[in-house]
Amino acid sequence: MRLEITGTWKGYFEFGEGYDEGIAGKKGYFIATLTEKNGVIEGTSQDTEGEGVVGEPATVKGFIEGDMISFVKTYPCKYFYDEDGNLIKDAEAGPHEVTYVGYFNSGTLSFTGNWEIDTGLNVNVRAENIDDVLAYENDQNYIPHPSDYYTLYDTGTWELWRVK
C-alpha cells in the first residue's frame, strides 16, 4: 500500500522526560502542508497552540519509505528554555532543526514516532566532573578521540494525522 502524503496534516510534539518538570509531558500543536514526489517530502509547518509554540513557520524536508517517514523541521532561528521555564528566541543563532522519525499506524491512520534536537553540547564520557574535563584538556599527552565524547539531545514523541 502506497501512502499519500501530499496534503494538509495536523500534529503535535510532546516534550520528553529530559525536560524540566514544568515542561516534560506537555504538547505543542502544528499544521503541516506537505507535498511528496518519488518519496521526497517538502513543505511548511506552522505551530498553532500549546507548549513550545513559535510564531515563525518552519520548512519541512524529508522522505517516506514504506510506512516509515523521516523529516526535519527547520525554524529560522534557535529557541530554548531558560532556567525559569520561559521559551526564549535567539535570533542571532542559526537555524533550529528538529528531526522527526516515525511509522504509519494503520489502526489510527496516523504517523507516530520520536523527535530530537541536537543541543550542541558535547560531554566527555571519560570525565566524572568539570575538574576531570579540565585535567584531560590541559594534559599535553591527551589526544581526544571522537569516542571520548557524546552529543546531548533533547527528545520527545510526536503524532501526525491527515486533515485533508
Image: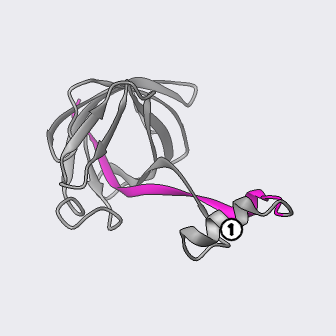
Residue 91 pos. (x, y %): 33, 25
For residue 85, side relative to residue 133 (left or right): left
Q: Is residue 129 visible?
A: yes
Q: Amino acid at mark 1?
A: Ala
Disc 1 packing (10 Å; few <14; some 14–19; many ≥20): few
Residue highlighted by disc 1: 135
Q: Is residue 3 left or right of residue 8?
A: right
Q: Residue at x 48, y 38 (%)?
A: 71
| Residue at screen point 54% across, 73% down | 129
Dividing the picture into quadrants, the one containing residue 123 is bottom right
Name the residue at 45% across, 27% down.
94
Give the magenta part as a residue range: 142-164
| Residue 17 to residue 61: above or below | below
Residue 49, picture quadrant:
top left
83 shown above or below 5: below
Magenta stretch contains residue 115: no
Q: Is residue 150 magenta?
A: yes
Secondary-structure class at tag 1: helix
Q: Position of residue 54 (x, y in %)?
A: 22, 33
* Figure colour scheme: one colour
Question: Chief secondary structure of the magenta span?
Answer: strand
Q: Is residue 18 above or below residue 3?
A: below
Q: Position of residue 75 (x, y in %)?
A: 37, 29
